[in-house]
Image: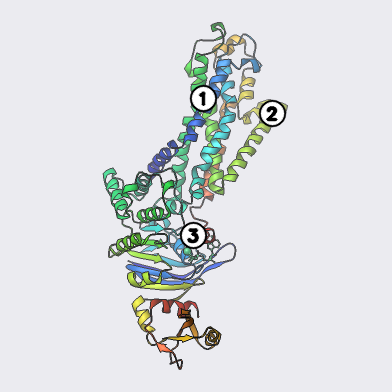
Amino acid sequence: MKIYEIVRFELQYISKRPANYIYFLILFVMAFLFAKQGIKGVTEVSVQVKENAPLIIHELTAFLNLPLLLITSAVMGMAVIRDFDYKMEQLVFTNPISKGQYLAGRFIGSFIVMVTLSFAIPLGSMAGELLSTKPASELLPFTPWNYLNSFLLIVLPNTFFLSALYFAGGAISKKAVVIYTQGIVLLIFISIVDEGVIETSKNLELATLFDFYMVQLLNLKTKYWSAAEINTQMVPISGAIIINRLIYIGVGVMALTLTFWRFKNTTKGHSTKKSAK
Amino acid sequence: MKLTIENLSKTYPNGTKALNGVNLNISAGMFGLLGPNGAGKSSLMRTMVTLQEADSGTATLGEINMLKDKDELRKHIGYLPQEFGLYPKVSAEMLLNHFAALKGIHDKQERKRTVNELLEKVNLTEHRKKNLGGYSGGMKQRFGIAQALIGDPRLVIVDEPTAGLDPQERNRFHNILSKLGRETIVILSTHIVEDVKDLCTQMAILNKGSILTHGNPKQLVKDMEGQIWEKVIDQEELGQIRQSHQVISDRFYDGQTMVRIVSTSNPGVGFQPVAPGLEDVYFSHVNR
Ligand SMILES: Nc1ncnc2c1ncn2[C@@H]1O[C@H](COP(=O)(O)OP(=O)(O)OP(=O)(O)O)[C@@H](O)[C@H]1O
Ligand SMILES: [Mg+2]
């Protein structure tokens, strides 16, 4: 009941912030434009592969993780920091809610917002395909499930991972600057794993277990597929793909556990010297 | 219901000893906490409302261990911090409604009624739909008072509640406090000594983290009867008097200086005995 109220208020609060609508729009427009133009050209597939084959949709979706990474830091990082920035924490923490209820409510509320925002990716891509500039011969019949599949496989677990990490960073440090730094560090880290470790790895099989964007992993899985297979078949969700996703979800869960363990619902106190009164 | 504090100490990470073995016994009614800036009043209050950890000592409210059973304690307290902010893009009604739900008023209608009553009480009904970011300092303070009173808490702790309130709103607030239930403990800190005398049945003076004296304000004043003296002097004489007597205050008076001292015996020629006030009790302890 208490958690429900915190979630409800969180959603009400965030819905009043114009920035969140702008985030949605940014994601939607980016997805739309990429899908409309088609991204097949930058991938390594044969010319017979259609623009909206499941694998190409995966790649498109993976690419849109980049803006998502930055948006998540803004939304999730502030979920707890907000109270300290606005000096509200003393009023909030003296309510009869436990630390767990507070953290759970704030995380769930902001995460619901993030999932909603990340939905702009499949929605924007689908709209882009429907208004595609490509001739009909380049396209397979419109299949919404393919977009949803990529969303569930790539976007949702990644959003959870990023949400948990930024939430943890914000709640434990209580400082906005940590969130921004964390955003950059995470971006660099993921790029290094992606371009440095995976691309140069001798044991690709193992390295792609850590592929955040899943592009290399999916390419590996479909390496010996014919164009016809790529056009008609979904990448089966098995072994390495499951392990990859579990790694990211697992790290997310660990970050949340650490948050619960380290977070203190106390105040640092406000020095009266700085008082404006 | 009784609030008992024993040997409470708190040192901040930077080494400031804010509380130094505080002992207090507080029963239902209004309790005034006086003390100079930096005395430790806010530190004591924050420790009592679960916002800060104490280093040592105990505090109990009835059966509740205030330092350990935090979740339980929070069901019974209302707190107005000395300094706080509010989400700017949220209305008073919306935030108060949220706090009421967190305080356990689950029924929607009942919550609405509570919120409206409180807004009426602190005279914010007119501004209830306005965003809190547009509130004046005094309005913000009144919102703080309203949220501290949600759900009839058994312990109300207000840290300089009337700071920034205009005289009319200050009176209104005093009326609210005096109407609180008989079972409620109200602890207020203030720099307005007169308010303590008018409102409180119990009080304590805190300085440098220690309780200097405590008791009933009227009784404390009574205990000083016959000990307060005044004399009109030249400015130059003040230094000399300071050496031989405990000076409570000195102020300009008709081109000369009026000095006020504490003395259990007659301090000599020119000194007139005067009736003590609570300020005399305050200064006689703090300036000692
Ligand atoms: N968060 C903090 N970190 C370090 N020192 C602090 C902190 N808060 C308060 N202090 C110090 O502890 C002492 C007591 O401060 P406190 O705010 O409790 O006094 P106060 O009686 O409320 O004063 P005022 O009348 O100015 O509000 C002061 O020396 C203050 O500088
Ligand atoms: Mg204070």
Under circle 2, the secondary element is: helix
- Left or right of A62? Residue B136 is left
Question: Where does the image place residue B261, in percent across and percent down from the top left?
Answer: 46, 84
- Left or right of B71? Residue A133 is right
| Nearer the camera: disc 2 or disc 1 | 1
Query: What amino acid is found at the position of numbered circle 1 in the picture?
Result: Phe
Q: Is residue A41 among what the camera can see? A: yes
Under circle 1, the secondary element is: helix
Question: Where does the image place residue B205, in percent across and percent down from the top left?
Answer: 44, 73
* View extreme (top): residue: A137
* View extreme (front): residue: B255
Specify the subunit that label 1 lies on.
Answer: A
Q: Which mark is residue B52?
A: 3
Residue appearing at x 42%, y 47% in the figure: B134
Give the CA separation, mark 2 to mark 1: 26 Å
> Is the same chain shared between marks 1 and 3?
no
Q: Which mark is residue A39?
A: none
Give the CA separation, mark 1 to mark 3: 45 Å
Looking at this view, is B161 or A147 the one in front? B161
Residue appearing at x 35%, y 54% in the figure: B146
Question: Where does the image place residue B4, in percent across and percent down from the top left?
Answer: 39, 69
Specify the subunit that label 3 lies on.
Answer: B
Looking at this view, is B20 or B37 the one in front? B37
Question: For disc 3, does the CB lie below 8 Å from ligand 1?
Answer: no
Query: What amino acid is found at the position of numbered circle 2 in the picture?
Result: Glu
> Is the same chain shared between marks 2 and 1?
yes
The quadrant where residue B231 appears: bottom left
The residue singled out by tag 2 in the image is A195
Q: How is the image coloured?
A: rainbow
Alpha-carbon neighbours of circle 1 within 10 Å: few (<14), some, or many (≥20)? many
The residue singled out by tag 1 in the image is A28
